[in-house]
């Protein structure tokens, strides 16, 4: 099953990458092991916990559920690419301010799911937030502050600019 | 003046000090650590739940290109370990016998994970399968095979306690009920699987990064295992992806395999468990069979409770003695109980081992007792809120103490206020009276109350310490041995130091545990961190403050006691206009000839000294006790048996005084949901002769955002005399009230009693069918 490494070209956080990867390598492994982007967490490898969620071409994708080569030619955003230098993304700010973080292991995946949701639907209802977030398991904080934090982002971005 | 006004930092909402690192992905967890030349390790596991190991042939694995080392249990020279000295019954890797399915028997280090896994396949192990024990009642039978040859009867631990006179009390009772309940095997639920990176900087120093909430467990265990003095074992704590007890307190096979493979190869070795390994082999909550007999007066006042508990402890002892202790000792809270008797047994089987889990011990018996309380209330025609208020322990007046029949010391108890507040918030009388059935949906509401101890007092070491270093630029370094596993203790410890020193939260930087530098500490379990490490931090900051005030007082020619520090100023208490700014004071202290180094030291000994009497079940098991009440509304689909908690969900928690209110809220909501509602409705490992048949997060149902009730949290403030700034534990108590509240709500909606958790749809469906009088088809 160990095929010859193949060329992979993709954009990650706005930066072009060219590298050789094994055909069976999962995207999460390439991000974490080859590119050292360990902000993306690996929880289950069965597409069920959502800790490895990243954004590909605007959609939230669990990076353990696709092969790295399937991302060839695509635009990937990981948690490392969300803040603008020292300036955090409004989603990150809301998570901090509202206390929607406990152990933090699922946080990068949740932030990326939220980004994909709000980019597509800037004004979601609570039910739409819950539905979009169902792929991200939390272990310790019970989703309440998390759902509220997303609502705070919506309120700020809708009311603000 | 309220406490919030008196305090500048604590009691006010604070963003967590580690939130930025976590929300940007910069926080490094054990699996994120990488060192130059690092190898990957993998554990070879047994396909039998109970078998003798006849031979292990590693030669093929060793010849596989890319493999750097292979180890088996024999390399550990007969070392065995356990939670305490008398329970050392487990080997790093099984040598002569495996006792549960997928127990580790060997391990490999290779250039990458795939190669390590392939090499494990090439290790040939010859087994002699033995008859297995998978049911504790079978294991207790005379003549049953033995899981451990030196443990006759397969009894892991047992307790027999007797307070008052239950027989007399039953005879005098108006109503006596006996019911059977059962709690399931549950996963701990953290998303981050166990992980370790180990290396030897030289031949007699071991360094590990390890995903443990109690890093001083591996510190001691690895020192013994590798025959190293403690000052040569360095455990560095990365960020921890949640804990909840058990696996992240103590050890797994990989935690021994990585250091020995690192020693053999001279390279760093990393082992990251898969979620399959976590769910199929790691520690889970004890399944417990509970018989509870309760006698009450005509008015529903508790006369006596008698329980018989049988818990499946699995293959090894682990923390079971403490688990069973906790199941019994807190039955005398949160209601007044004059007579109590219990017989509790934990039994060895060939299932994966059971251990501590959030809500440790108390969760099982509180579920049984608080559901039975609703059964009693119904029989007597008393409202469920009313019967709880009648029995609830009163809040002692300041300076007074309430003692339970088993000598627990209660300095504060807000359970009555908790019950009243949740009843009010959920609009109890109206919600209870509301129409139950609408088409195929039935609605119901349930209430429960509970308790949890702050800081399990164990035999042996339970002290905590802190070091406050004042840097010459006025900032503060804080070292504790406490572990923030997500509960927010790093923030609270920093806040306590800032409060005492009159600083802002941002002026304090807390360091994570590094056993080379931080003070020794038992770890994060038993809701002990805030009360013990919090007190140590307070004392350390006070010590530093005292040293600083000596310099300040010299400036004014007065005694240090005549001065205080607040809002970054040291001032004369009698005349606030006489003051020195903080930074100037620090510089005075650091630079005045001959120059000083300000280091504050603080120790909490609250967990030391009086420990519970394991024989009689008397004396305090905690420094103090939190109280909780919870009310939940459920919606039951009468056609499918699916139960859902609605957003009409309230929890009131008496944590004494919330040091960081939003963190208490997330802790309480999380506990109430993940290990509470989830325990009531969803989670259970399914077993088949020792094999866990749902070891993944799809078949093992964990609750998700769309099922989560938006639980409201009410803070009940009682200012406990035994906690720092009046604080008690916040979170574990909340796991214990949700299961009975939800089960009581299902009964309110449908009239059925679910006595075996969880109330999964199939169980509810059949119970509804039986209630309608139709025999199951």
Image (spheres, rainbow, N blue to C red):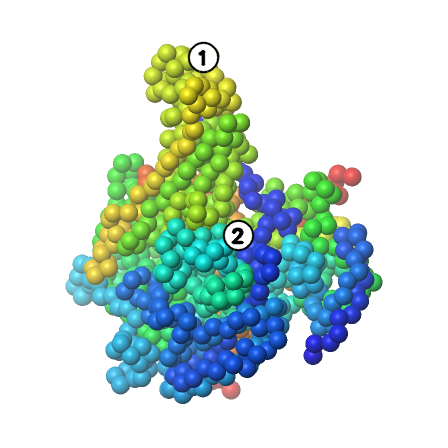
The chain letter under disc 2 is: B
Number of other residues with Cα within 10 Å of mark 1, as a class: few under 14, some 14 to 19, many 20 or more: few
Q: Is residue A8 above or below residue B412?
A: below
Report the mark closest to the observer, 1 or 2: 2
Q: Position of residue B340 (x, y in %)?
A: 23, 61
Q: Position of residue B2 (x, y in %)?
A: 44, 30
The chain letter under disc 1 is: B
- Judging by the rendered image, the residue that carries numbered circle 2 is B238
Closer-to-camera residue (B147/B16)? B147
Residue contact at pointers 1 and 2, CB within 8 angstroms: no
Q: Position of residue B745 (x, y in %)?
A: 47, 62
Quarter of the figure with residue B298: bottom left
Q: How many marks?
A: 2
- Judging by the rendered image, the residue that carries numbered circle 1 is B578
Q: Is residue B184 above or below residue B237?
A: below
Closer-to-camera residue (B388/B580)? B580
Residue in view at x 38 percent, y 80 percent: B97
| Mark 1 / mark 2, whichever is N-terminal | 2
Residue in view at x 38 percent, y 21 percent: B550
Quarter of the figure with residue B120: bottom right
């Amino acid at each position: 099953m160990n095929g010859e490494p193949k060329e992979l070209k993709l954009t990650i956080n706005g930066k072009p990458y060219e590298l050789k990867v094994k055909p069976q390598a999962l995207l999460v492994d390439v991000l974490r092991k080859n590119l050292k982007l360990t902000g993306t967490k690996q929880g289950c490898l069965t597409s069920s916990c959502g800790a490895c969620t990243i954004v590909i071409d605007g959609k939230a994708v669990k990076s353990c559920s696709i092969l790295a080569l399937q991302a060839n030619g695509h635009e990937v955003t990981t948690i490392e690419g969300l803040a603008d230098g020292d300036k955090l993304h409004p989603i990150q700010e809301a998570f901090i301010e509202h206390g929607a973080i406990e152990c933090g292991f699922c946080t990068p995946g949740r932030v990326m799911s939220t980004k994909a949701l709000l980019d597509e639907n800037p004004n979601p209802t609570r039910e739409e937030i819950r539905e979009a977030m169902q792929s991200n398991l939390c272990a310790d904080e019970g989703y309440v502050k998390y759902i509220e934090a997303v609502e705070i982002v919506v309120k700020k971005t809708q009311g603000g600019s | 003046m309220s406490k919030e006004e008196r305090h500048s930092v604590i009691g006010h909402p604070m963003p967590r000090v580690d939130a930025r690192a976590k929300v940007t992905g910069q926080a490094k967890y054990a699996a994120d650590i990488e060192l130059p030349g690092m190898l990957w390790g993998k554990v070879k596991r047994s396909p039998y739940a109970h078998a003798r190991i006849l031979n292990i042939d590693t030669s093929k694995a060793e010849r596989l290109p890319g493999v750097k080392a292979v180890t088996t249990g024999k390399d550990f020279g007969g070392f065995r370990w356990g939670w305490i000295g008398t329970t050392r019954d487990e080997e790093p890797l099984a040598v002569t016998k495996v006792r549960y399915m997928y127990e580790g028997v060997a391990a490999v280090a290779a250039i990458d994970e795939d190669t390590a896994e392939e090499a494990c396949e090439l290790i040939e192990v010859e087994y002699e399968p033995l008859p297995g024990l998978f049911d504790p009642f079978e294991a207790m039978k005379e003549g049953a095979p033995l899981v451990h040859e030196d443990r006759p009867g397969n009894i892991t631990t047992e307790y027999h306690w007797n307070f008052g006179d239950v027989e007399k009390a039953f005879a005098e009772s108006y109503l006596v009920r006996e019911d059977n309940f059962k709690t399931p095997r549950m996963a701990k639920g953290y998303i981050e699987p166990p992980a370790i990176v180990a290396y030897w900087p030289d031949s007699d120093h071991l360094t590990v990064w390890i995903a443990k909430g109690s890093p001083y467990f591996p510190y001691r265990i690895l020192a013994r295992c590798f025959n190293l003095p403690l000052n040569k074992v360095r455990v560095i704590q990365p960020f921890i992806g949640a804990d909840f007890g058990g696996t992240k307190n103590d050890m797994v096979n990989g935690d021994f395999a990585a250091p020995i493979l690192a020693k053999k190869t001279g390279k760093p070795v990393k082992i990251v468990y898969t979620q399959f390994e976590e769910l199929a082999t790691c520690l889970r909550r004890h399944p417990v069979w509970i018989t509870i007999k309760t006698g009450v007066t005509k008015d529903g006042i508790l006369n006596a409770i008698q329980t018989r508990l049988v818990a499946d402890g699995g293959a090894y002892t682990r923390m079971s003695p403490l688990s069973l202790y906790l199941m019994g000792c807190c039955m005398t809270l949160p209601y007044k109980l004059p007579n109590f008797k219990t017989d509790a047994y934990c039994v060895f089987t060939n299932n994966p081992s059971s251990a501590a889990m959030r809500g440790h011990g108390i969760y099982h018996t509180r579920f049984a007792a608080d559901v039975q309380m609703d059964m009693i209330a119904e029989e007597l025609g008393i409202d469920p809120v009313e019967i709880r208020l009648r029995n609830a322990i009163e809040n002692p007046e300041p300076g007074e103490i309430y003692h339970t029949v088993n000598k627990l010391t209660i300095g504060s108890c807000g359970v009555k206020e908790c019950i009243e507040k949740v009843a009010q918030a959920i609009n109890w009388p109206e919600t209870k009276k509301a129409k139950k059935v609408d088409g195929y949906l039935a609605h119901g509401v349930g209430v429960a109350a509970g308790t949890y101890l702050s800081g399990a007092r164990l035999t042996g070491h339970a002290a905590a310490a802190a070091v406050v270093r004042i840097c010459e630029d006025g900032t503060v370094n804080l070292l504790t041995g406490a572990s923030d596993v997500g509960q927010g203790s790093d923030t609270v410890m920093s806040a306590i130091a800032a409060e005492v020193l009159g600083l802002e939260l941002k002026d304090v930087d807390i360091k994570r545990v590094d056993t080379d530098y931080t003070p020794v500490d038992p770890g994060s379990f038993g809701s002990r961190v805030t009360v013990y490490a919090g007190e140590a931090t307070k004392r350390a900051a006070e010590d530093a403050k005292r040293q600083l005030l000596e310099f300040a007082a010299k400036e004014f020619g007065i005694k240090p006691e005549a001065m205080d520090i607040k809002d970054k100023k040291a001032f004369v208490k009698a005349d606030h206009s006489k003051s020195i700014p903080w930074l100037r004071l620090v510089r005075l202290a650091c630079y005045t000839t001959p120059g000083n180094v300000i280091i504050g030291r603080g120790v909490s000994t609250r967990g030391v000294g009086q420990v519970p009497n394991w024989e009689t079940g008397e004396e305090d098991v905690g420094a103090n006790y939190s109280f909780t009440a919870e009310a939940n509304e459920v919606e039951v689909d009468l056609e499918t048996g699916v139960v859902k908690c609605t957003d009409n969900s309230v929890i009131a928690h008496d944590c004494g005084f919330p040091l960081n209110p939003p963190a208490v809220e997330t802790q309480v909501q999380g506990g109430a949901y993940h290990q509470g509602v989830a325990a009531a409705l969803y989670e259970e490992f399914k077993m088949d002769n020792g094999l866990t048949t749902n070891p993944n997060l799809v078949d093992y149902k964990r609750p998700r955002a769309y099922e989560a009730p938006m639980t409201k949290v009410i803070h009940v403030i009682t200012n406990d005399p035994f906690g720092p700034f009046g604080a008690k534990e916040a979170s574990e108590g909340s796991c214990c009230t949700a299961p009975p509240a939800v089960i009581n709500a299902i009964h309110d909606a449908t009239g059925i009693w679910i006595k075996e958790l969880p109330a999964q749809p199939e169980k509810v469906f059949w119970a509804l069918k039986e209630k309608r009088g139709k025999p199951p088809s």
